[in-house]
Amino acid sequence: MTIHLDTERTTLDAARAALRGRLLADGVLIDLGSPGLYGRTGVFERVYGAVDAAAVRSQSDLDAEVLRFPPVEPLTAFERTDYIASFPDLAASISGFTGDDRTHRALLAARERGERWEGFLEPADLMLTPAVCHPVYGLVGDVVHAGGRFFDIVGDSFRRELSLDPMRLQAFHMHEFVHIGTPESAKAHRDGRIPVMRALLESFGLEIDVVPANDPFFGRVGQMLARNQVEQALKFEFVTPVYGPDHEATAISSANLHEDHFGTAFGIRSADGGVAHSACIAFGLERITIALFAAHGTDPDAWPTAVRSALAL
Amino acid sequence: MTIHLDTERTTLDAARAALRGRLLADGVLIDLGSPGLYGRTGVFERVYGAVDAAAVRSQSDLDAEVLRFPPVEPLTAFERTDYIASFPDLAASISGFTGDDRTHRALLAARERGERWEGFLEPADLMLTPAVCHPVYGLVGDVVHAGGRFFDIVGDSFRRELSLDPMRLQAFHMHEFVHIGTPESAKAHRDGRIPVMRALLESFGLEIDVVPANDPFFGRVGQMLARNQVEQALKFEFVTPVYGPDHEATAISSANLHEDHFGTAFGIRSADGGVAHSACIAFGLERITIALFAAHGTDPDAWPTAVRSALAL
């Protein structure tokens, strides 16, 4: 069994390396020298922009409030999400230099000696934002009005994962459509959007399955949290077989019911006085884009007419 | 003199606070709880997108290669720019958690006690990118071909500045058009683009002056570097009187000649064998956008017809 798993791992790694190599060789991505960090070229941006625009069109009936966030968030906001308890290995904190001329000279001298100099920096009370919907919960006030609120959110996300799988980046973007309201309206948002998202992704010529999933909770306690999440069917992922039918399919989007997690953490109530529930659907923009290159090749002009039409390419 | 300067400072601070308050009250920006970090609403994004598109149209004759970069860059790339020597106070390093379950429990226990927990994280060999053109120099190889190369670059920039001036953000975007070539072609790029940029910004209904400027070099050595930069006329800024005629105008774009700074640091030669020279022009997308709100009000539909037309709004 171990041998079988090792073989599967090896062929999966080979498939990942092959896709990564092809994206680099064909000038879609550029290696920046750290796993999961890439420069993006014009052909990548053309498809990425088309994917994002199609995602927005597919949710235009929500008439959602547009919000955009920077790649960093204040530590106080990060703390309220309890992210460091559940996903410490993915978190990233920011430090800055607050010293004077003299401390700067000491830093440069250490650097000159080939020593690390980050120790001269102090925590800056900022974190890289791990999930673009996090900032919104601190901004909606204590009560959301009857009917709840819908938000159209895009931002940079960062998760500290060092992978050579081009489907797993450290820095990426999600386009999320978040609802904050009642238990019923949150579940309706999550469930009602699933067929719309599936149809959209299938129109891109991708083979899609929608499966129960869990977030990558850390450690032994995390394993229990992950099991609970799957058992309670809180998270569904839209997966596509990027690496062929012999390997597990890769998530490119998700639909998530948070129940009262953020409502409780941020003290939000719905119009009826109960703790607000929330849900979000999330398009993984880089993952969809790269899945398209994997499925249809690196020249979008040669993609099937139906796919180009669905993407308005 | 001191009294005069203090008065000027106070009225300038008041003008900055007034603009910030108006942008927040009118729902253009959203306060995220850290100076210079804002959420951006639909009206902001509408103008921001129009500014960016107009900037791209104005440089379309360059036929530049499109490159997009994530908000973080590997430490190795950052080190080659020597940024920590010149601008330590603006730099931002990233740390991640590499510990096990046991270390995580210790982190959470410290957090529970109200202590800082960033000390449990380790430097991640990543920095927030302070200037979006930095990554490009490591990617062009040893020699640029005759005629040089032109790049169209956008990315998140981060500079650790804590200011309540809405024109001074910690996280922002520059759209840069970079040329790498010979001393002559670099200077021609920088100088040739200045009138084009000025005309574009003036078409937005902004009063523009083009002035010699310096980067905010750190410390006593930095003061000398700044003077040199001005004396050698390496940097020009496009400034506009956001806070009225009584206060210094604010830079919203720049045109920069790097001479052989990056060519030497990254070992790049031009086709004739000399060290490559480079130049970039940079549109400060958030600064232009906010200058427009300051000049014309927070309702773009009420802006002068000529301005809306120049922005294709």
Image (cartoon, coloured by chain):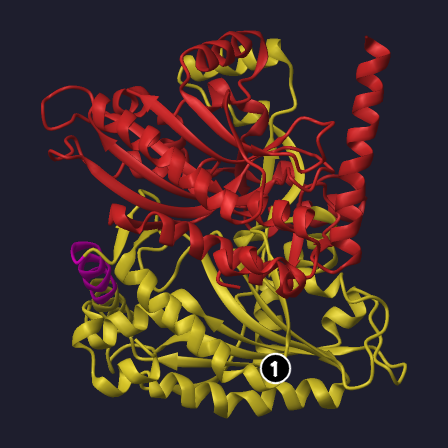
Chain colours: A red, B yellow
Q: Is residue B117 above or below residue B212?
A: above
Q: Is residue B116 above or below residue B194?
A: above
Q: Residue furthest right?
A: B273
The residue at which mark 1 appears reads as B234
Quarter of the image where the C terminus of chain B is located: bottom left
Between B307 and A190, the one nearer to me in the picture: A190
Range drawn in magenta = B15-26
Residue B247 sits in quarter = bottom left
Q: Is residue B267 above or below residue A115?
A: below
Between A14 and A138, the one nearer to me in the picture: A14
Residue B300 sits in quarter = bottom left
Secondary element under disc 1, as helix, strand or loop, is loop
Percent of width and height locating residue B33:
31, 42
Q: Is residue A200 left or right of residue A109?
A: left
Q: Is residue B64 left or right of residue B196?
A: right
Q: Residue at x 64, y 36 (%)?
A: A119
Dot 1, how many residues are within 10 Å of its Cα: few (below 14), some (14-19), or many (20+)? some
Quarter of the image where the N terminus of chain B is located: bottom left
Report in which chain the residue with disc 1 lies.
B
Q: Is residue A33 magenta?
A: no
Percent of width and height locating residue A95:
54, 40
Helix, strand or loop: magenta stretch = helix
Q: Is residue B187 left or right of residue B7?
A: right
Count the labels in the image. 1
Q: Residue at x 67, y 88 (%)?
A: B187
Q: Is residue A248 left or right of residue A58?
A: right
Percent of width and height locating residue A179:
28, 35
Q: Amino acid at mark 1?
A: Leu
